[in-house]
Image (cartoon, rainbow, N blue to C red):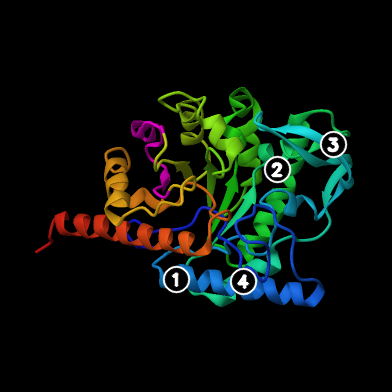
Amino acid sequence: MNTLLPTTVVGSLPKPSWLAQPETLWSPWKLEGDALLEGKQDALRIAIHEQSRRGIDIVSDGEQTRQHFVTTFIEHLSGVDFEQRKTVRIRDRYDASVPTVVGPVRRERPVFVDDAKFLRATTDRPIKWTLPGPMTMVDTLFDDHYKSREKLAWEFAAILNQEAKELEAAGVDIIQFDEPAFNVFLDEVKDWGVAALERAAEGLRAETAVHICYGYGIKANNDWKATLGSQWRQYEETFPLLQSSSIDIISLESQNSHVPMDLIELLRGKKVMLGAIDVASETIETPEEVADTLRKALQFVDADKLIASSNCGMAPFPRDVALAKLSALSAGTGIVREELERSAPRVS
């Protein structure tokens, strides 16, 4: 798209109360059968409508058709037993009951392709679809078969590549892989994480993105952030690797974080999807606050390579808060867009 400083949402948006419990991550569905399918599609329509009317340029499904950004994909794979559960440490931060890998993992059929086709048919704007990244998938399971995080990641990468190619064929313009694990397992990122991510994106003509954040605004994540000191420099380890990778867009957390803005310089040449909306606070950013964040970023990334977004998903927010934050994102980006257009050299 030719829009200067396009806006988008990183991942989730709140679901309607008739579909799932509000302000609750991974809430069970309130509907069943055909009513659930219809309810998901209605929620997706609402998400598209709200993004469009609030000035979001690259729209997504807001993850309205899935409960969890990782396990909803895994549920559709063979080789994973959801009845046989184990408690594991997720991203070295909190304990969770997770399914077990009991055999070779396989994708028997497309997972999100029908939903992506519905999204494509519902809007003429560019669309983005999110998938879990290989390392984050590995970190959300108990592996009782491969006995190797790396081997399992490569299996997942091949499966994700199959899904991504079919999403591309369905008309998806940007395919985003979510890898919050990249901010935790820095040695694995270097050893095999980026390579597995590139395998997941191999051969795609659609633009590819990787989203690396510090997590939803839940207590476990906020407590972890409090231990990271006055500067969060995890990106310093991963950005050079991603700058030389095949991934087109790097998505990062910025607003109200302790990430030094100059780390973006390490991504020079890549598109940057900058988080200018905080997902750990219900306080609504002012347009000027958003604009100020983007202005600071423009010291280190060219304007034609900057995309304005949220830090992470907004599923835990009340809907009115999330929607107000979308409006602030759009308004603040509009301020900077106008400044850039006014300062551009005029051709006589």
| Image disc number at residue 86 | 3
Tell me the quarter of the image containing the N terminus: bottom left
Instruction: Give, as a three-letter code, the residue at label 4.
Output: Ala
Give the residue number, with chain letter if any, for mark 4. Answer: 43
Report which residue position mark 1 lands on: 52
Q: What secondary structure is found at the residue carrying circle 4?
A: helix
| Mark 1 Cα shell of 10 Å, populated few (<14), some (14-19), many (≥20) | some
Question: Where residue 166 appears, x then y in whole percent?
Answer: 68, 61
The residue at the point 52 percent across, 40 percent down is 213
The residue at which mark 2 appears reads as 157
Q: What element carries label 1?
A: helix
| Amino acid identity at mark 3 | Lys
Magenta residues span: 258-277
Q: Is residue 336 left or right of residue 154?
A: left
Image spot of residue 43 (x, y percent):
61, 71
Mark toward the start of the polypeptide (2 vs 1): 1
Determine whether the residue tagged by mark 2 lies in a helix, strand or loop.
Answer: helix
Rendered view: 142 above or below 22: above
Compare marks 4 and 3 and give the one earlier in the sequence. 4
Q: Which amino acid does label 2 sit on?
A: Ala
